[in-house]
Image (spheres, rainbow, N blue to C red):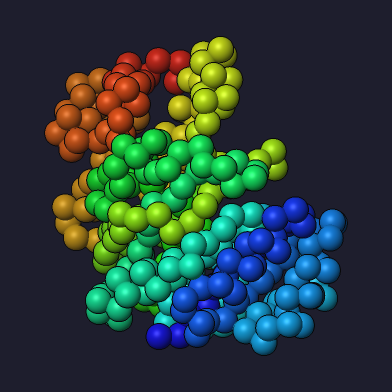
Amino acid sequence: MTVAILLSTYNGEDYLAEMLDSILGQTVEDWRLLIRDDGSSDGTHAIIEDYQARDGRIRWINPEVQENLGVIQSFWTLLQAEEAEAYAFSDQDDVWLPHKLAVQLEALAQVDVYQPALVYTDLSVVDAQLQVLAASMIRSQSDHANTSLLAELTENTVTGGVTLINQALASLWTGQEKHALLMHDWYLALLAASQGQLIYLDQVTQLYRQHAHNVLGARTLRKRMANWIRPQRLFQKYWALIHDSQEQARNLLELPLEPENRVLVEEFVTILEQGPVERIRRIFGRGYRKNRWFHTLVFRTLIITKLFYKRSNP
């Protein structure tokens, strides 16, 4: 199976070499690493050049044109750079465990090549020095991993650095979606759950590093406390997440869906346009929820009451 590893970099000089070393240390050796730099101004370029010179499997796709596209568009550009049977997404500051690619490719090999599929795994959350903060990110943050469309509509448990997709799924991300994406990993998970298979392997294959410059990261205690001491800001974040997840899901309606899935998506993206009785019917009739009971309580309460809705979404 031909494998393309996709790595988007941006001012990643502190940890990039360690990430690249972990890719070079994979038990699977038949792969191609495609790197796109998103306009770095630090020493990232020198690191990329060094590794490209020492290993012919590494290709820097844009050494002459430096343009900041943002993480979503940068990864989409990488996906178009070279055709492969499987694509593994990589972050610049984490560490892959040696068996990472092997276990995911083995699972993907069991899927019909014409069926869109995404395989992902658990991660261990670590600090900048790779000291473990949470042995299982899935259990510490989401309680369990999502594999259904219903669950993935409202909460994402797929992290980009442990995302592996096949060509059938890659072809569904056109880059011309009508509605904004929250993140590429979440959208790919929605595509997989609605069009094929979203597969979770319950084992850790990556060390997910938390540091001062993460674009996104794990929900640490410090981040949670910062939210709770500003409750109005917390409500605004909840409403923004609900709205953005609805907009992202609207893209699915442009694709062929099973009738039950189409109703599931349609009723989710239009739920706030309904009266309170209909909102209650949809919430409990369809089972829209979060993975943890407390977040489900907040999510359902906000949608049913529309508390602070106008203030947060003028």
Q: Quadrant of the C terminus?
A: top right
Q: What's the residue at 34%, 55% (across, down)?
A: 203
Residue 23 lies, in percent from the top left, at 57, 70
How many discs appear? 0
Tell me where residue 34 sits by quadrant.
bottom right
**Against 257, is 282 above or below?**
above
**Against 273, is 129 above or below?**
below
Residue 152 lies, in percent from the top left, at 32, 47
Tell me where residue 48 sits by quadrant.
bottom right
Q: What's the residue at 65%, 44% (across, down)?
A: 128
**Against 277, is 249 above or below?**
below
**Against 306, is 108 above or below?**
below
Tell me where residue 189 sits by quadrant.
bottom left
42 sits left or right of 35 in the view: right
| Towards the viewer: 21 or 309 | 21
Q: What's the residue at 52%, 62% (across, down)?
A: 96
Q: Is residue 291 visible?
A: yes
90 sits left or right of 144 in the view: right
115 sits left or right of 220 in the view: left
